[in-house]
Amino acid sequence: MKNLKALGLILLALLIGLAAAAYATGWVSRQAGIASDKVVVAAVDIELGSKINAEMLSTLDWPAGAMPPGAFKDVKELQDRIVKVSILRGEPLLEGKLAPLGTLGGLSAVIADGKRAMTVRVNDVVGVAGFALPGNYVDVMVNAQQDKADGEAGKQISITVLERVLVLAVAQEAGRDDTKPKVVSAVTLELSPEDSEKLDLARSVGTLSLVLRNQVDQKTVGTAGITKTELFGGPKAPAPKPAVAVKRRAAVAAAPLAIKRPCVEVIQHGASTLSCF
């Protein structure tokens, strides 16, 4: 009896094994039937602005139905191209991550169309204690003396002149993967031509400060700035005195004076009369 039970368990195990083997064989055959193609990926981490060479790249099998748009199949197509964003190892190379054909390497390759790069001198305070790193956005504030008007001395004012400015590089480093603060002496900003003129004038008339802002905050807040008088609450203008109503006395017409005339009392037949002349 015990032998029959053992034999039955052995047969059951064999059946389960055969079923698993059949399923595995079918799965492998189905996978082999899926069409695949070669995709060029990064063999090493590539920093933005770098020129690509064959040693930086490799190819990887990729399902043909899931090819990413703009992917490359041949390493030769990417020779001497410039990347405008950082690419991690194993990440596919896409056309959207590359600078246009003919672009030279360096910082100029990562500047957006219609934009300019401008460098300003900063210190550990102006540079937001080194937290203004490449890829961050900052506002630019200037502290300057206003122009004199009507013979009065110009007032000192602090005002935000530029908002949401992209930091391209700090010192000579443009990599955006580092999050550790760096105290540097210069920061390169990406600006439109008009904003470049504003920044050039602002740094010549006053002291610049960078204000770090949230990367996803795209709101523009126009401010009128603040003067020293407004900051410290200067003397207030005296309140105007209430107008006093002036009561005018109505002119009283002078009553005509009675003119005294000579009068004579006449008594006649027991009656008295008064006659005046």
Image (cartoon, grey):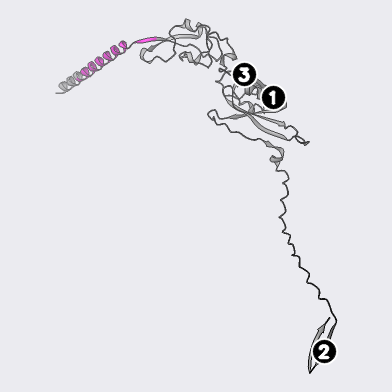
Report the amino acid beneath label 2.
Val
Q: Position of residue 126 (x, y in %)?
A: 67, 27
Indicate whether 260 appears above or below 271.
above
Q: Residues within 10 Å of mark 1 (few under 14, many from 20)?
A: few
Q: Position of residue 223 (x, y in %)?
A: 62, 35
In magenta segment, residue 188:
no
Residue corresponding to mark 1: 201
Give the SS element for disc 3. Answer: strand
Decide which of tag 3 and tag 2 comes sooner along the chain: 3
- For the record, the magenta segment spans 12-37
Residue corresponding to mark 3: 117
On-image quarter of the C terminus:
bottom right
Decide which of tag 2 and tag 1 comes sooner along the chain: 1
Q: Residue at x 62, y 18 (%)?
A: 117
Give the SS element for disc 1. Answer: helix
Indicate whether 112 appears above or below 231.
above
Residue corresponding to mark 2: 266
